[in-house]
Amino acid sequence: MRIRRLTVADLDACTRLATDRQWEPERHKWSLLFEVGEVHGIDAPDGDGLAAANVLTRYGHDHAVISMVLTAARHSRQGLARRLMEHALEQAGDRTVSLHATEQGRPLYEKLGFRTVGRVAKHTGVFEGRPSGVTRPAIEDDLGAILALDAEIFGTDRSRLLRRMFGFGLRVRMADGGFGHCWRNDSNVVIGPVVARDPATAQALIGDLALDAGGEVRMDLDLAQEELVGWAVAHGMGRPWQVSLMVRDGDLPGDRTRQFLPFMQALG
């Protein structure tokens, strides 16, 4: 059961593996992960799809994210997730590696040297509010300002990912000192990333993006940002589901106090 680098030709197999574990198929999301990351997998010995998979995404020379750690139910408890994790960590080299962990996955990651540095809660709901009047739709000419601000606050190079916002997402919005983006997943619209110099600017961006989207939206909120969490709950965002933010070999780059929403949990 060798590990191989998957390609977009394996997209259907990845979505089947996700639904096997009661995840949504998230075909649009997987397509982006194939484009900006490296998807690794182990084929099922019976030829029926994938036994396991994960994704490694590198940012510059100092940070990487591991995500989509999945093992088919019929192949669980065979050590496949650990084998793929060890492979991804080897590919990451000397980079600091982060991931978002469920309670089921956390013990494995701790054995591999990860430590918990925070908690993140997925909030979903129909946003209740009014337009802020301080943000505007972004255009591709704004990309230079977006990349410069993100390099300062995120602390490493994720320009390849951010360049995809205009094609991948539904909306990109700008404000004085911030930017935000939203994209459609299977059952809702995900708000993120949102990067801003202060909470008021972040709230304006998030609210306007949510109102643009209409219907149910998702926000992955850092529970350390209590002001933002309280604001989101007061505007209709409920049903929180928590995961642990974990890091291995160093500390996360950048200023997390001004990183208000991630692009998605799978991309840090």
Image (cartoon, rainbow, N blue to C red):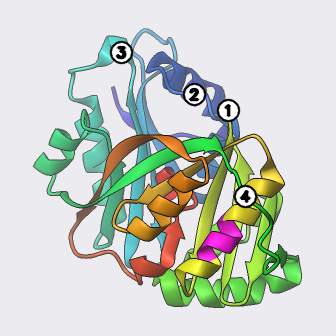
Mark 3, Cα crowd under 10 Å, few <14 / some 14-19 / many 20+, is few
- Indicate yes or no whether the magenta region holds residue 65: no
The percent position of residue 6, horizontal first and vertical second, equals: 54, 40
Mark 1, Cα crowd under 10 Å, few <14 / some 14-19 / many 20+, is few
Q: Nearer the viewer, mark 4 or mark 2?
A: 4
Mark 2, Cα crowd under 10 Å, few <14 / some 14-19 / many 20+, is some
Q: Splitting the image into 4 quarters, where does residue 255 fall?
A: bottom left
Residue matched to label 3 = 73
Residue matched to label 4 = 129
Q: Which residue occupies the foreground of this view, 41 or 64?
A: 64
Main secondary structure along the magenta-highlighted residues: helix
Name the residue: 66% across, 40% down: 8
| Mark 1 or mark 4: whose residue is earlier in sequence | 4
Residue matched to label 2 = 24
Gap in angstroms between the C-alphas marked 3 and 2: 15 Å
Q: Vertically, is 146 above or below 118?
A: below
Gap in angstroms between the C-alphas marked 2 and 1: 8 Å
Under mark 3, the amino acid is Ala
Q: Vertically, is 223 above or below 74?
A: below
Gap in angstroms between the C-alphas marked 4 and 3: 42 Å
Under mark 4, the amino acid is Gly
Gap in angstroms between the C-alphas marked 3 and 1: 23 Å
